[in-house]
């Protein structure tokens, strides 16, 4: 794959490459903010307080239909490689080398494929996808590349366990695990307080151990130090500010917790809202630092989440309702599991306070960021599925996504049960989304524009639309040689959709 240089009016010479900050939040739902990503504010938008997201949205462009995958590792590998999950085969969350997740080994009805449990790798490795990672290409182009927070790129004892192996110049607190041991410096950011394994303990922040400091704050301070180092070396920087928040365990951030209790939220939901506001403070601190260092006008800021908001467990209130009007949450192929907040601010390109209703998907960030950086003629060992959304950022909004197919593939078992949760393949094309469930080879068809809550399954009354979308989905799965589970009862692989 070869990328061309940026073609719009904001294209910058290599000597004046823009800084790029990708602010990436873990498990943040589409509704987990005071910024409405819909045509109206909802009670959830009124619940949360994210003033710095509001500021970024007022200065940039909001995307109302940005998609990730339902769980973290597939999203992060797609981000770093530009590949669709069906192609890179890191279809579930990773941790231990060469090992399926425990819930995949004893499923009653399905046997799951040997997916790439080791994540991604900068070199050929069994059960891993070999790819040229986004930061490695930016690094070669002269960028100082900073990783701060959650990595979750490679399993324990594989090269990509350390983000420096895939092109980051500095790694702040990133390792193989996908969640924090603790958010509290007083707990040494360790899982020991809850009887958890040491694999969850956050590395590299020992200077904050024993202190009354929250993890989001410690990561932000270290990220600012790294940005200053890049400026001192007179290099443009790419900073991947990848917060562990708002992933479980949902611990109290004492700076904000009481205000949400006072608003009438229960203990769990007050803790969750406080996690979100602490994340938002980090965003504000980074933007303020860029302003103080006179970097704001030459810095692109992208905001994104890795999957929908947690709703099936560990929350207060009724399960599967925390992303309303969207159905379900993390782990689900319903909109609540995959639709996430996204904002882009590119000074001189994005119109302040603008909104974009085109849909896009996580692998699109790879070619987009490379185009923003002016990186050209960089071949990659992997096939890149993502499409640059830079054209969507222009004032004339010339690039449209209205009829492009987007694909999801999860031949795995997550564990919890709920709407849209289970092994599946799916396609969105235009207003329609087709979901194919592997366990019984059944379909759900929704008109997302008319039925954002996915309450009306149209599969039985629109068989021709099911057939059309199933054919396109099957063609994609065959093209990338997608893995399918096996029915234990018959011993046969799950059929491709519509076959």
Image (cartoon, rainbow, N blue to C red):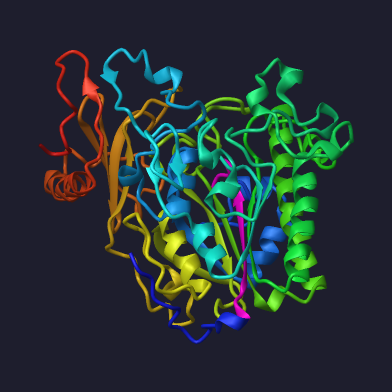
- Asked whether, in this view, residue 382 is left or right of residue 341, the answer is left
Kindly indicate the quadrant of the structure image that contains residue 420. Answer: top left
Q: Could you tell me if residue 345 is visible in this image?
A: yes
Q: Residue at x 74, y 70 (%)?
A: 233
Q: Where does residue 445 sit, x and y in percent of width and height? A: 25, 43
Q: Where does residue 169 sit, x and y in percent of width and height? A: 64, 56
Between residue 14 and residue 37, name the one nearer to us. 14
Between residue 96 and residue 427, name the one nearer to us. 96
Q: Residue at x 62, y 36 (%)?
A: 247
Q: Residue furthest right?
A: 211
Q: For residue 494: magenta?
A: no
- Vertical arrangement, residue 272 with respect to residue 63, above or below: above
Q: Quadrant of the C terminus?
A: top left
Q: Residue at x 75, y 44 (%)?
A: 216
- Vertical arrangement, residue 470 with respect to residue 389, above or below: above
- Asked whether, in this view, residue 202 is left or right of residue 41, the answer is right
Q: Provide the residue span drawn in magenta.
A: 16-30
Kindly indicate the quadrant of the structure image that contains residue 409. Answer: top left
Q: Where does residue 315 sit, x and y in percent of width and height? A: 62, 28
Q: Where does residue 84 sit, x and y in percent of width and height? A: 35, 49
Q: Could you tell me if residue 284 is visible in this image?
A: no
Tally the numbered discs: 0
- Asked whether, in this view, residue 45 is left or right of residue 98, the answer is right
Q: Residue at x 71, y 48 (%)?
A: 279
- Vertical arrangement, residue 18 with respect to residue 239, above or below: below
Q: For residue 23: magenta?
A: yes
Q: Quadrant of the N terminus?
A: bottom left
Between residue 68 and residue 381, name the one nearer to us. 381
């Amino acid at each position: 794959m070869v990328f061309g240089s940026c073609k719009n009016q904001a294209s910058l010479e290599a000597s004046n490459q823009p800084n790029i900050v990708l602010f990436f939040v873990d498990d943040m739902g589409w509704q987990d903010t005071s910024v409405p990503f819909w045509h109206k504010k909802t009670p959830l938008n009124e619940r949360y307080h994210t003033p710095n997201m509001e500021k970024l949205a007022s200065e940039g462009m909001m995307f109302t239909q940005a998609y990730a995958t339902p769980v973290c590792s597939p999203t992060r590998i797609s981000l770093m490689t530009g590949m669709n999950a069906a192609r890179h085969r890191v279809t579930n969350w990773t941790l231990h080398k060469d090992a399926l997740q425990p819930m995949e080994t004893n499923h009653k009805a399905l046997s799951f494929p040997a997916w790439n449990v080791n994540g991604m790798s900068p070199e050929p490795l069994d059960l891993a996808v070999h790819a040229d990672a986004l930061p490695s290409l930016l690094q070669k182009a002269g960028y100082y590349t900073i990783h701060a927070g959650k990595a979750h790129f490679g399993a324990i004892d594989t090269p990509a366990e350390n983000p420096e192996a895939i092109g980051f110049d500095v790694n702040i607190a990133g390792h193989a695990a996908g969640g924090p041991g603790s958010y509290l410096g007083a707990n040494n950011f360790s899982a020991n307080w809850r009887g958890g394994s040491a694999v969850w303990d956050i590395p590299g922040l020992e200077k904050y151990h024993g202190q009354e400091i929250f993890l989001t704050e410690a990561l932000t301070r270290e990220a600012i130090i790294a940005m200053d180092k890049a400026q001192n070396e007179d290099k443009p920087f790419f900073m991947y500010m990848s917060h562990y928040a708002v992933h479980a365990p949902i611990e109290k951030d004492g700076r904000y917790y009481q205000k949400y209790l006072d608003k009438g939220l229960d203990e769990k939901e007050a803790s969750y809202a406080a996690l979100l506001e602490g994340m938002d403070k980090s965003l504000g601190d980074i933007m303020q630092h860029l302003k103080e260092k006179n970097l704001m006008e030459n810095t692109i800021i992208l905001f994104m989440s890795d999957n929908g908001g947690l709703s099936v467990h560990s929350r207060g209130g009724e399960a599967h309702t925390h992303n309303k009007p969207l159905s379900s949450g993390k782990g689900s192929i319903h909109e609540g599991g995959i639709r996430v907040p996204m904002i882009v601010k590119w000074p001189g390109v994005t119109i302040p306070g603008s909104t974009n209703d085109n849909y896009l998907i996580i692998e699109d960030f790879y070619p987009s960021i490379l185009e923003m950086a002016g990186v050209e003629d960089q071949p990659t060992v992997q096939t890149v599925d993502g499409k640059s959304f830079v054209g969507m950022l222009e004032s004339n909004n010339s690039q449209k996504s209205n009829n492009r197919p987007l694909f999801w593939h999860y031949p795995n078992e997550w564990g919890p049960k709920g709407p849209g949760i289970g092994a599946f393949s799916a396609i969105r094309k235009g207003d329609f989304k087709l979901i194919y469930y592997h366990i019984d080879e059944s379909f759900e068809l929704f008109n997302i524009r008319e039925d954002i809550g996915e309450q009306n399954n149209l599969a039985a009354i629109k068989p021709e639309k099911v057939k059309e979308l199933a054919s396109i989905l099957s063609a994609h799965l065959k093209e990338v040689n997608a893995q399918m589970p096996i029915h234990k009862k018959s011993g046969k692989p799950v059929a491709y959709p519509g076959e």
